[in-house]
Structure formats: C-alpha cells, structure tokens
C-alpha cells in the first residue's frame, strides 16, 4: 500500500493489546496516529460493535472500526510489505503464531491476575486507568469511578480463571516464563532472532503491564529478570532498528532455542485450550482440566476455541514437508496434543 495517510489507533496505556499494536506499527514505520479511548481526538472515529480496544481505523475505510490484534497484524502484512513481522519460512511462522497466541490468551491471565487479585495492584490500576482517560477528574468523583471500575474488573477474575486454587499455577507459570525468556534473550535480541516477529509483540504487550505497571508482578521481574524489563522498554519503540532479511531465526535455531518455551506452552496453555474446546463443543458451562497437578476451572471462552481452530487451520495449510518439521519440533513438548 502506497497510501501515506495515517491509520488511527485508539487504545489505552494500561491495555496490553493496545501497546502490542502500537509497538508493531512503530517498528514497521507505518504512519499512524495514536489516541486514547474517550479522548476528544477519538470522538469522531467509528466505534466497534463490541466495546474493546485497540481499535484500528484504516484510511481507505474510515467508517470501519477494526479490533483483534492478531488478524490485524496479518492484515497489515498484506497492505504494507516493509519490515514484516511474519517469518518468511512458513513452518517457523507457525511457531511464531503459536507463541503469539500463548502470549495473548494465556499470559494475559497472569496480567489480569496480578492486577486485580492483589489489593495493592488493584488500588493503583483503578485510579491510574480512570485518570488515563479522564485526566481532570478528582476527589469524590475519582474515588467513585475508580471503585466502580475496580469492582467490575475484580468480578471478571473468575472469567479468566484466576482463583485461590489456580493462583499458584498462574504465578509459577509467570515466573517460569521470565526465566525462559531471560535465557533466550541473553542469546538473541528477539524471540524470532535478530528481528522481532509477531510473537515478540504479543509477549511485549502483556509484559508491558506485568513488568512495568502492576506492583506485585513488577517486584518479581525486578528481582528475577531485569533483562526482561530492559527488553520491554526497548520493544516499546523499535522504529530505530535496522533489520535484514536473514536476521530471522532459522529452523535449526527455532527447534533448539524455542523448545523450552514450547514445553511451557504444552505444560499450561495446551491443556486449557483442549479442555475449553471440549466444554464448548459439549455445551458445558465449565472448563475443567488438570494443569501442573491442579484442577483448573473457569467458564468456557468462545474466542479461545476460535484461536485453537485458527492454529489448526494454519497448520493444515502448510506444505507436507513443513507440517512434518513442525510435528517433529513439537514432539515431546505437549504441544503435539493440539492436533489429536
């Protein structure tokens, strides 16, 4: 696309998916205007049917409000060719998509848990989020808006699966991710090699909250993984980074270096994805499965069943040799269960 008119990106600083999309646009040097939801600047833009952020409005479709960061990143790939975030090797690109999905749909459980299950974090998040969108509110009005927002968000903890029973699973998984990512980023600047892939931006979005904003999870990162904090600061704006086509991780590097992350995904996210699909296909009102020796329960989530279908469809679209390589790479990680 040669159109230099800017896209409009409406979001919020405390929204991991907003930060994900903004960072991807910055890296790709795609002209855009960032504006806060609820701001006067965003008032004239179209609203999505579902009240979610970020919202992306394309200059050739000014009346269309687009949401959902994962397909939006793919749409941007079709419209802008420079500085792609999708590896050119289809098999490696499938792994990149799996890692992005893990970040968007599992790591977000840790983000929501640390923000709203801990009173000190909730007390910060409710006030800061209100002030982010209404910077002049104060006094009683601020207190009432913050309390209402906090009450609504805390009530949603069960929706994402956060409870006293599942808290140890979420928190130990977060700590393991910090350790695994710290080890990986000590060897290469990005998950996908010497240039970022879509998974880098997915991880960045959630970690922008976990290691920079929410006190409980920030304290853990500061003590155990300062490299991740520095990485998140860097990925916030990669417009300065020059990349080459051969900066992508190759198959040998992906099979070896990404395996610990794949084992983590197979350990925690894959059991949930399969149980969630089972609950939805059976019209059940509860997801139940064992994760790390703990009974995990929550409401079924239709969108995450869609994520599983999307991964399976992308895998099925691979050439036979590419599918064989992916199968061999996943063998023994627990992720091979995705195709059972």
Image (cartoon, rainbow, N blue to C red):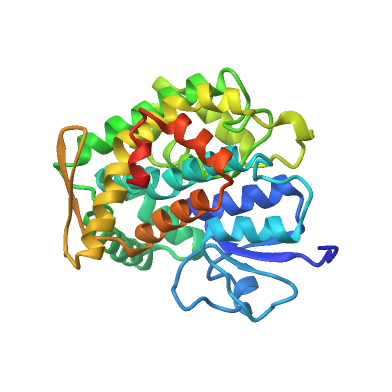
Q: What is the quadrant of residue 152 in the picture?
A: bottom left
**What residue is shown at x 46% (from left), y 57% (from top)?**
310
Residue 244: tell me if it is visible: yes
Q: What is the quadrant of residue 327 in the picture?
A: top left
Left or right: where does residue 289 sit relative to residue 204?
left
Q: Is residue 137 above or below residue 238?
A: below
Residue 228 percent across, percent down from the top left? 51, 28
Which image quarter holds the N terminus? Answer: bottom right
Q: Is residue 252 above or below residue 330?
A: above
Residue 11 percent across, percent down from the top left? 55, 61
Q: Is residue 115 or residue 288 the one in the foreground? A: 288
Q: Is residue 37 or residue 197 the one in the foreground? A: 197
Residue 14: tell me if it is visible: no
Left or right: where does residue 222 sit relative to residue 270?
right
Residue 219 percent across, percent down from the top left? 37, 29
Q: Is residue 304 or residue 117 the one in the foreground? A: 304
Left or right: where does residue 99 sit relative to residue 290?
right
**What residue is shown at x 27% (from left), y 43% (from top)?**
271
**What residue is shown at x 40% (from left), y 33% (from top)?**
218
- Number of dots carrying numbers: 0
Q: Is residue 261 above or below residue 164?
A: above
**What residue is shown at x 45% (from left), y 23% (from top)?**
225
Q: What is the quadrant of residue 264 in the picture?
A: top left
Residue 161 percent across, percent down from the top left? 24, 50
Q: Is residue 337 or residue 17 the one in the foreground? A: 337
């Amino acid at each position: 696309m040669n159109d230099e008119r800017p896209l409009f990106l409406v979001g919020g600083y405390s929204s991991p998916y907003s930060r994900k999309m903004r960072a991807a646009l910055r890296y790709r040097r795609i002209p855009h205007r960032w504006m806060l939801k609820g701001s006067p600047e965003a008032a004239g833009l179209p609203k999505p049917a579902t009240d979610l952020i970020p919202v992306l409005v394309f200059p050739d479709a000014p009346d269309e409000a687009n949401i959902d960061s994962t397909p939006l990143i793919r749409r941007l790939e079709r419209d802008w060719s420079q500085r792609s975030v999708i590896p050119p090797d289809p098999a490696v690109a499938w792994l990149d998509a799996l890692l992005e999905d893990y970040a968007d749909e599992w790591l977000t459980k840790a983000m929501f848990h640390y923000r709203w299950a801990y009173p000190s974090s909730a007390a910060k998040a409710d006030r800061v989020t209100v002030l982010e969108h209404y910077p002049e509110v104060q006094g009683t009005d601020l207190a009432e808006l913050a309390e209402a927002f906090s009450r609504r968000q805390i009530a949603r903890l069960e929706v994402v699966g956060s409870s006293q029973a599942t808290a140890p699973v979420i928190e130990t998984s977060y700590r393991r991710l910090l350790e695994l990512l710290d080890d990986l980023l000590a060897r290469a600047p990005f998950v996908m090699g010497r240039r970022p892939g879509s998974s880098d931006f997915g991880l960045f979005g959630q970690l922008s909250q976990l290691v920079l904003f929410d006190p409980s999870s920030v304290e853990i990162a500061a003590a155990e993984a300062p490299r991740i904090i520095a990485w998140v600061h860097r990925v916030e704006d990669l417009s300065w980074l020059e990349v080459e086509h051969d900066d992508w991780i190759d198959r040998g590097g992906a099979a070896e270096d990404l395996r610990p992350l794949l084992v983590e995904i197979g350990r925690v996210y894959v059991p949930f994805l399969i149980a969630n699909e089972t609950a939805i296909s059976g019209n059940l009102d509860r997801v139940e499965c064992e994760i790390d020796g703990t009974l995990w329960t929550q409401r079924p989530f239709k969108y995450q069943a869609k994520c599983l279908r999307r991964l399976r469809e992308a895998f099925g679209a691979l050439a036979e040799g590419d599918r064989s390589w992916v199968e061999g790479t996943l063998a023994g990680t627990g992720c091979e269960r995705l195709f059972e």
